[in-house]
Image: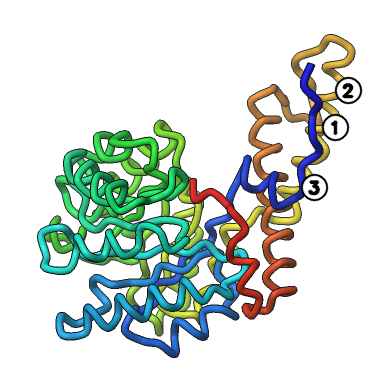
Amino acid sequence: MAEIQARSPLENIRNTVRPRRSLLYMPGSNARALEKARTLPADGLIMDLEDAVNPDAKERARSQVLDAVKEGGYGMRETVIRVNGLDTPWGEEDLRRAATIGVDAILLPKMEYAAQVHAAEEILEDAGAPDDLAVWCMIETPLGVLHAEEVACATPRCGALVMGTADLAKGLHCAHTPHRMPMIAALEICVLTARAAGIAVLDGVHLDLNDEEGFIRACHQGRSFGFDGKTLIHPKTIKAANDIFAPSDDEIEWSRIIIEVHAEAKKKGEGVVVVDGKLVESLHVEDAKRLVALIEAIETIEAENERSNGNDSSSKKSGLAAR
């Protein structure tokens, strides 16, 4: 029998769960923002070469992002590059240049068909992309929502679906209402798809930076829908997203109780147990273990980022899988 090796906390994160409470878009053309990102408490950074960059700044933005990733210093923050589409003059070169620089994932915009994912993957692999480089797919059109399953299952590299709710609202001709009622069907279809595919799913951005109440409401709604976290456009929203998408103290306490009680019941040959008047089965214990693993991963990553303080470039090369 092969000897079982003890795993470090970082290895456990790599093999179990990855916190994605807050993914902050960073304009690739803004060198100061890319530098500041090394100290921000976001779980991940989406270095944007697409919507946030004017056409005349595309190549400069690409060079700045590639240089920033190569320099490192982002600690345990997950690094993602959103490339331009392959139907633009910059998309293919974005993919080729980003394939081997050590980024965690490539975010593909406006995905609607598996063939689009395959085309991007072929370019990445031709450019020498490692096996653990993930592709994330933006769902931001009505057709993308209807073909979400096709997109999510196009390749084992697919690690996440990311909602592009601003473009989706435009495509639906719908309003941005406080409770996002016109988008609920599309949002839940993508959550269902991601869970069926076993990948992450991230909620879209909240555009009104002066609407703190609305942002908090959207975060709570997104978590209740089942999203792993929220994409953000300003650092001031990171803390709220981190707090809301993390398990609460009460959730963690309850999870640890039912894990322990159910384990004791299992030793006695009992598959079901009642805790504080609530029926607890194995399915509840599985979710409890997920929450405990998530909070432990959050604590480990936050401690590592605080230790590195965004200045230890070696911490970026932690080898965490982006899926």
Q: Is residue 317 above or below residue 62?
A: above
Which x, y percent locates residue 289? Answer: 70, 37
Q: Is residue 184 visible?
A: no
The Cα–Cα distance between marks 3 and 1, rounded to whole angstroms, is 11 Å
Which x, y percent locates residue 113? Answer: 17, 41
The Cα–Cα distance between marks 2 and 3, rounded to whole angstroms, is 17 Å
Tell me which residue sits at (33%, 75%) in the image: 207
Q: Give, as a three-letter code, the residue at label 1.
A: Glu
Please state if 228 lies on the left or on the right of 76 as rendered. Answer: left
Q: Mark 3 = which residue?
A: 253
Say which label, 3 or 1, has the lower sequence index: 3
Residue 92: which quarter of the image?
bottom left
Q: Mark 2 = which residue?
A: 264
Please state if 152 lies on the left or on the right of 35 as rendered. Answer: left
Which SS class for mark 2? helix
Q: Which mark is residue 260?
A: 1
